[in-house]
Amino acid sequence: MTLPPSELAIFVADGVMSAKTPRKKKKMMFEELKDVSEMGGTVEETLNAFTTKEEYGVSITKADLVRWSILIDRYGRPEISVQIFEWMEKKEMKFTPSQLATFVDFIYRVHSIRAALDYFESVDPDFDNMDYKAKNWSAYDFLARSMSKNWNKRPW
C-alpha cells in the first residue's frame, strides 16, 4: 500500500492519536518508522511529522531515536537506522561516544568501511589513536577491528 506523503501523514497521525498513553503512542510511532518504506514514505518525512508535538501529543527524545534505530537494525533494516542518525545529525543533535560508535557501525554495514572511516574523521579529525582513554575510542576501536578483519580485501 503506497500513499502520497500528505495522506501518509494523516494515516500515521490518526493511528497514533487513537493510542491512549504516551508509551503506546511511542510504540505506534516506532512501528510506523520501522515500516516507513512499505508505506511509501521516507524516514525524514516521518520523523519531521513526529516532531510536530501538536499533531501526535507526545514528544520524542534523542534516546528514543537511538533506541528505535538499534531495534530497527535488529529487524534487518540498517538502512533505516542510518537515515535516522542522518536526520539526527541534520537537526544538530550531539552524539555520545557510544552513539557515535553505533552510527559508524551502521554506516559500515550499509555503505562501506571507507564511508565509516571518512565520517569518523570528519567528526573527530584530531583523534589520537594512541590514547585509549580518548572520548571516541569505542568508534575508533570498532573501525580498527573492522579494518583488520577485512585486511585482505582492503576496501579503504
Image: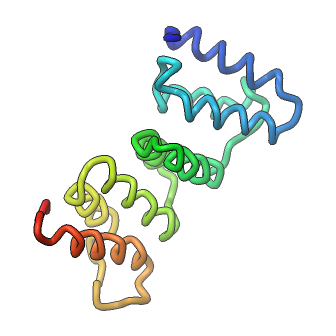
- Residue 113: where, in percent of width, then height? 24, 59
Picture layout, residue 146 above or below residue 49: below
- Residue 5: where, in percent of width, then height? 51, 13
Out of 139 and 61, give the one closest to the viewer. 139
Which residue is at 28% across, 69% downward?
Answer: 146
- Residue 25: where, in percent of width, then height? 77, 34
- Residue 149: where, in percent of width, then height? 24, 71
Which residue is at 49% across, 11% downward?
Answer: 2
Picture layout, residue 27 above or below residue 35: below
Which residue is at 20% across, 58% downward?
Answer: 114
Picture layout, residue 141 above or below residue 34: below
Out of 92 and 135, give the one closest to the viewer. 135
Which residue is at 34% across, 63% downward?
Answer: 123
Q: Is residue 56 left or right of residue 154?
A: right
Q: Is residue 57 left or right of residue 102?
A: right
Image quarter for residue 50?
Answer: top right
* Colour basis: rainbow
Image quarter for residue 131?
Answer: bottom left
On-image quarter of the C terminus: bottom left
Out of 96 and 139, give the one closest to the viewer. 139
Q: Is residue 145 left or right of residue 96?
A: left
**Number of labelled discs?**
0
Residue at the right extreme of this rendering: 20
